[in-house]
Each structure stands twice: as C-alpha cells, then as structure tokens.
Amino acid sequence: MQSEQFLRISRLLGDEAVTTLHEKRVVIVGLGAVGGMCLESLVRSGVGWVRIVDFDTVGITNINRQVLATHETVGQSKTDVAHARIKAINPYCTVDVLPLFVNNDSVDRVLEGPIDLVIDAIDSLNPKCALLEAAYKRGIPIISSMGAALRRDPFLVRRADLMESWGCPLARAVRAKLKRRGVGRGIEVIFSPEEVHYTYRNPEEEEHADFNEQISDQGRRRNVLGSLPTVTAVFGQNLAHLALSKLLEAEILEGREAYNPATRQT
C-alpha cells in the first residue's frame, strides 16, 4: 500500500486504523447503486482485501444511480467493471471476483475462507434472506441495506438492528422470513422509515407488466422500481460507514467527544 494515498485518513483516525483496514477481508454482495457506492468508499478507505459478488451486467437504466454504470460499461459484467475500478483506485487491493447468483447452493462459496465482515446489498428478497441467514448462523458478522428505491428523502436514512427497524416494506418481509428460520437480533441495517406504498413479493406474482420489464441473467424477473441517485448514494455511504465502524473500534469514527456548538472555536 502507498501510505501517501491514505494520508488524510491516517491524519484523522491514526496510522493504526489505516493499517487495520489494510488487513481486513470484506465480502460485498450486490454491486448496484448501494453496493457499488459502498464498495467505492471502502476501497478508498484502504480495505486491503475484498470479495465482490454479483451475477448481473450493467444496463442502460443503471446509469442514473450506479457508480459503476456508464455508457462505456453497459453490457459488461458488474464484477469485471468493479474489479477494474478497484485496481484503478488502489492497485494493491486484493480482489476475489465471484460473478454468481446468491442462493442456498452458492452461499457456501460466497462465505468461504476467513472473513471479517459481509456486506449485503442485494435487492431481491429470497437471495438476501439466504445470505443473511447463512452468515448469521455461521457467526460471520454481516450488515445489510434495506430498500432504497421509492424513497425521496435522504435525510430519513438511518441505522438500526434489523429486528428494530420500522416503516420499510423490504425490512418487514426480511424480518418475517428470518424469524421463521430462527434468526434474531444482531444484524445491523441501513434503512429508511419513509412511507412508501409497495408490498414486496415475487416478481412473477405482479399483475402489471411494467413491473416485469427486466429479466435477469438467471431467467428471473426483476421488479423495476423508481429511484434517485441522491438517496441510493446516501444508503451506500451510510452502509460503508457502518462497515468501517465494525472493522475499526466504533469510537474511532464517532469521535472521543460529542460536538458542542456552545464551545465551538472560530
């Protein structure tokens, strides 16, 4: 690693924190709007080993919000694009590329080897639950993003334990499935309680064709939901910051003393 590249981080958090991040092994599953932004910040922060997991390719409709999506990358594998971007930011970062669909059959490969943290940015209910359940039951630390689509207010985005989140239809569906599988507290999530009117269900069950206009590489239909780049970026950055707080001591990021405007010096 080139120490000069991370000078601003070491000046804020200390050399030991930067060294710690260089040694961490992180798995990021889902390289869309939230996962791609999260990955960007973690690599720029100096995480030294990442496993990137996504089966999808870049589409034209991704350009409005996904950091990996440009007119030049349309049609390319998201993992290939992400790999190239990681190396452009930090050539010394080790990258394990898994262009696969997450399900009960593939989750062993996703979670194999020593892992410090798994980051779930999957936007499909069943694969998300499969990953969360597998990591939870194996005692592997995992954090997750809930629904970022359909939201308009980035100032409502926050963190909580999954079992204590509220107002998010995706989180509600994930909680219900995981509780039936014996999963409890211990998975922190980024979510928004902003009111949306949508019920998460299998895309094949949707009555209206406009929800089914995209077909995945796996032959599965994908729900097409409206989204803003400002909101998805905040989800991704909050997810990355939550990841850093897990990889480092939380107080390093939160500061030793609370900010008090009455004692502010100019």
Image (tube, grey):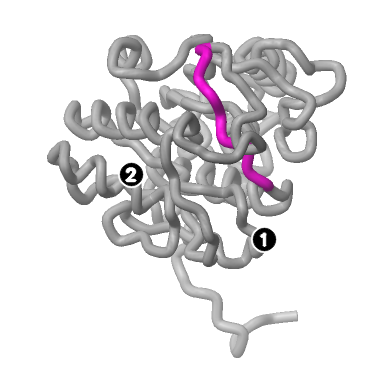
Residue depicted at x 79% and y 25%? 60
In the image, residue 104 sits, relative to residue 233, either above or below, namely: above
Q: Locate residue 260, reporting x and y percent.
A: 55, 82
* Residue found at the far left of this picture: 182
Mark 1 or 2, nearer chain start: 1
Q: Helix, strand, or loop for circle 2?
A: helix
Q: Nearer the viewer, residue 266 or 40?
A: 40
Q: Which mark is residue 162?
A: none
Q: Nearer the viewer, residue 149 or 81?
A: 149
Residue depicted at x 33% and y 22%? 115
Q: Locate residue 157, reporting x and y percent.
A: 54, 60
| Magenta stretch in the rendered image | 218-226
* Residue found at the far bottom of this picture: 262
Residue carrying label 1: 152
Instruction: Look at the numbered discs 1 and 2 and tell me whether their residues touch, using CB distance below 8 Å.
Output: no
Residue depicted at x 56% and y 66%? 156
Residue depicted at x 71% and y 34%? 66
* Residue found at the far front of this picture: 207
Q: Locate residue 130, reporting x and y percent.
A: 30, 27
Q: Locate residue 128, reporting x and y percent.
A: 38, 32
Q: Is residue 182 left or right of residue 251?
A: left
Crowding at mark 2 (Cα within 10 Å: few <14, some 14-19, many 20+): many
